[in-house]
Amino acid sequence: MKMEDIARLAGVSKAAVSLAFSGKPGVAPETRERILQIAHENNYELKSRKHQGDTASRAITFLVFANSGLVVDSYYQQPFFRELIHYTEERCRMLGYSLMFSTISVDKLDEGAASLIDGGNSQGVILLGTNLGRAQISLLASKLTLPMVVIDNCYETLPIQFVEINNMMGAYDAASHLIEQGHRSIGYISSRDRIHNFEERRRGFAFAVQEHGAELHSDCIFEVEPTVLVAQESLKRKLSEYREEGKKLPSAFFCECDYMAISLIKTLAEMGVRVPEEVSVIGFDNISEARIVTPELTTVHVEKESMARLAVNALVQQIEGVEAIRSKISVDTQLVVRASTSAV
C-alpha cells in the first residue's frame, strides 16, 4: 500500500497524509487520527524520515515571516502554501535533508536571523518571500550567514537566489483566453494587500489587454480581501452600486488569485448573476478548491512542485559547496480551462 492509497481511503489529499504522518500542523486532529487508523488497519509501515548516517545534522529551515499581508500564523493551512511546503519537504528528504520550520513575526526580522545563526542546527534556509519587500529580504540576507534561497518572490537587483512564478505570463495567458472568447469589457478583481506576485499579474493582464485592444476601465477594478472563500458583502455592495449607476457589469473578470475568484463567484450567485452564462470568471494558482466550487474554476496552474524542487536543489548546491552561478529562476505557468469561462 502506498501513501496515495491511504489518501484515497481517507478521502484527503496526499499532502494531508504526509502532514498527518509527520505530526506537523495543517490537518484537523480528527482527520489525523482517521489517517493513522487507516494506515494501521492496512499494515502501512511509517518509514522514518531520517536517513542513515548524520542526517540528524543535515537540516534545512523553511523560514516564514508571518502576520503580514497574505501570510498569517496559520499560513500552512492555505492550499497554496500547504502544497508548496509538501513538495519542499519531499525534495529535502530525497536529497538526504530533514526540513525544519521557523515562523517568526515579520516585525521581529532581526531576532529571526539571530535565532537561526545561534541555533546551529540548520545548514541553509528556504525563505518564503511571498509577503516580503525588497528591503526586508536584503536586510535578512545581510544578517544571515547561512546559504539562502528565496521562494515565491524575486527582486532582480538583489544578489540572492530566487525561485518565483512567471506571474506575467500567467496573467497574460488568462486575459488572452478571455479576449479570444470574445470578451472585450473585462473587469479586474484586485487584492487589498499588495505583494510582488499581484503587481506582476496586473502587469501581465494589462499587457494582454493593450495588445489585443480590449478595455479595462478604472471603475471596473474592485478591491477585495485576498484570502476569503465566501461571498464578500463589500464586493456585493460595490457591484450593486455599479449596476445601479446604469452600467453593465463586465462580461468577464480576472482575479489575482483563486481565493478571490471563488469569493467573486459566490458573491455573483447571491446577486443572481450566473457564471459563466452572464459573467465569466478566471483565477490564478489552481488550488484544490478550484475543482470544488460550482462551476469549476478556470485558472492558471502554478508549478509548485517544480518551484520547490528548484529551490531545494539550488540551496543544497550552496550548502555542499558545488560551484554554481547564482540565478533567478522564473517558473512558467499553464492555463487550465474549466467551466467558469465561456464564449460571449
Image (tube, rainbow, N blue to C red):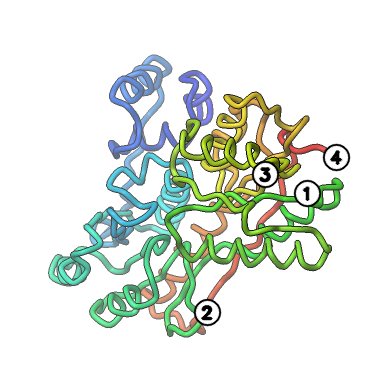
Residue beneath disc 4 = 344
Whole-number angstrom distance, CA of label 4 to CA of label 3 = 14 Å
Q: Earlier in the sequence, mark 4 or mark 3?
A: 3
Whole-number angstrom distance, CA of label 1 to CA of label 3 = 8 Å
Q: Secondary structure at mark 2?
A: loop
Q: Earlier in the sequence, mark 2 or mark 3?
A: 3
Q: Residue furthest top?
A: 41
> Relative to 116, is 5 on the left or the right?
right
Whole-number angstrom distance, CA of label 1 to CA of label 2 = 34 Å
Q: Earlier in the sequence, mark 1 or mark 4?
A: 1
Which of discs 4 and 2 lies nearer the camera? The answer is 4
Whole-number angstrom distance, CA of label 1 to CA of label 4 = 9 Å
Q: Which mark is residue 178?
A: 1
Q: Name the amino acid, label 4.
A: Val
Residue beneath disc 3 = 282
Whole-number angstrom distance, CA of label 4 to CA of label 2 = 43 Å
User: Residue at position x 57%, y 62% from top?
Assistant: 165
Q: Secondary structure at mark 3?
A: strand
Residue beneath disc 2 = 327
Q: Quadrant of residue 69?
A: bottom left
Quadrant of the image containing the C terminus = top right
Q: Are marks 1 and 3 in contact (CB under 8 Å)?
A: yes
Q: Name the amino acid, label 1.
A: Leu
Tell me residue 4's x, y (percent): 53, 30
